[in-house]
Image (cartoon, rainbow, N blue to C red):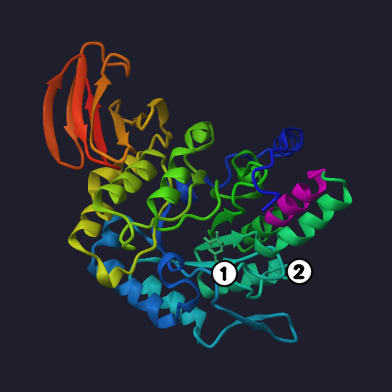
Amino acid sequence: MILRKVVLIPFVLLCIAQSPTMRGQTTLAATPPMGWNSWNHFAEHVTDADVRTAADLMVSTGMRDAGYIYVNVDDTWQGTRDANGELHPNSRFPDMKKLGDYIHSKGLKFGIYSSPGPKTCGGYEGSLGHEVQDAQMYASWGVDFLKYDLCSMQDPMRELTAKNNGNTDAAFKMMIDAFRKMGDALKATNRPILYSLCQYGIAEPWKWGPSVGAQMWRTTDDINDTWGRMTIIGLEQADLAPFAAPGHWNDPDMLEVGNGHMTTDEYRTHMSLWALLAAPLLAGNDLSKMSPEDKSILLNKEVIAIDQDPLGKQPTRLYQRGDFSVWTKPLADGRVAVGMFNTALDSRDVALDLTQIGFAQGATLHDVWENKDLGKRTGIYSRNIPKHGVVLLILSK
Ligand code: GLA
């Protein structure tokens, strides 16, 4: 993917300078959005029945009451456009309005997916040339969330870049204009529809996302259910802390917790990192098969509270020493969440210097995953952390 990760500071600064409303619609995502998305488990096989069942399970498993409000249909719901340009869902989704009504009847919100290009990543119909019409249709279906995925728009961007001898300015402008077009179309519906950009971090969306009306933007390429991919993504977010705040969030992609290819310690690391990062928490598991461990991770109230902290700060990576890193996140009430991560292949004894993280007089420690108060500590606090494990603490004076 040649265009990914290319940085174009002057153009980005220009976009920001032209944007008087950087904060966007803060009320829509005062804290990082939470919900469930069909892609990570069902991928291109998802059906209306799967989504209805997911909505039922969001209630019965306690996900909804823990704060996971959005039920998002990802790619592959689309059929074809009629003579008027109106897009109809495919046969797996007989009636989107009824599906939205069903989701709403459960006290949940309805999310959908499209692309600014002619085709989605799955090769289904995108919104190019039909942005206003599609946005109006989503609003008429009661849609509350749109994930808008670059996908096939990368082809004309590549052509433009080649035509300009490798200069990406015009291609990036084309992309940002396309995202703005849908942002404006959503705003014009007068329905609060959370706008989630998915373009894998190309041209630093954290700098211009708010100016096109977005509440969240993907910062990386896709996650998958492996320790390697999850940690590459999660641990590379450290520099993006200045760009997350109430109303707009960096999105390191959806959760894989419960999809079966990581250990419980690894999923705890995943959830801890995402919570510290103030990342949107979009579960992507099969809700009908949640193990007690999956539930203990996804439904952990204290971890969710770290993610949803109203201050909306991403953490600082205090240090990285080989396979051990420490991340600290200030919370609204003055406490500090601390993640101690061991990415080594064996367990490690690790030490946290409380003075170094601002607690020279000592701190009262609470272990979040153990749900245990550890009392007042001073100086160096040492722990043994299992392979690929985490100790998540809340510190108070
Ligand atoms: C891209 C996105 C994924 C998913 C798929 C659907 O890869 O990054 O999250 O939406 O498209 O095709």
In this rendering, would 335 be left or right of 16? left
* View extreme (front): residue: 345
Say whether residue 103 is visible. yes
On residue 129, which mark appears? Answer: 2
Q: How crowded is mark 1: few (under 14 residues within 10 Å), some or many (20 or more)?
A: some
Q: Are marks 1 and 2 in contact (CB under 8 Å)?
A: no
- The vertical placement of 382 against 230, above or below, is above
Q: Give the range drawn in magenta.
A: 167-179
Tell me the CA gap for discs 1 and 2.
18 Å
Residue kind at label 1, given as amino acid type: Ala
Q: In which quarter of the image is the C terminus?
A: top left
Q: Which residue is drawn at 33% across and 69% down?
A: 286
- The vertical placement of 263 against 245, above or below, is below
Q: Along the line of sight, which residue is nearer the eye, 261 or 135?
A: 261
Q: Which residue is drawn at 70% across and 50% down?
A: 2
Under circle 1, the secondary element is: helix
Q: How crowded is mark 2: few (under 14 residues within 10 Å), some or many (20 or more)?
A: some
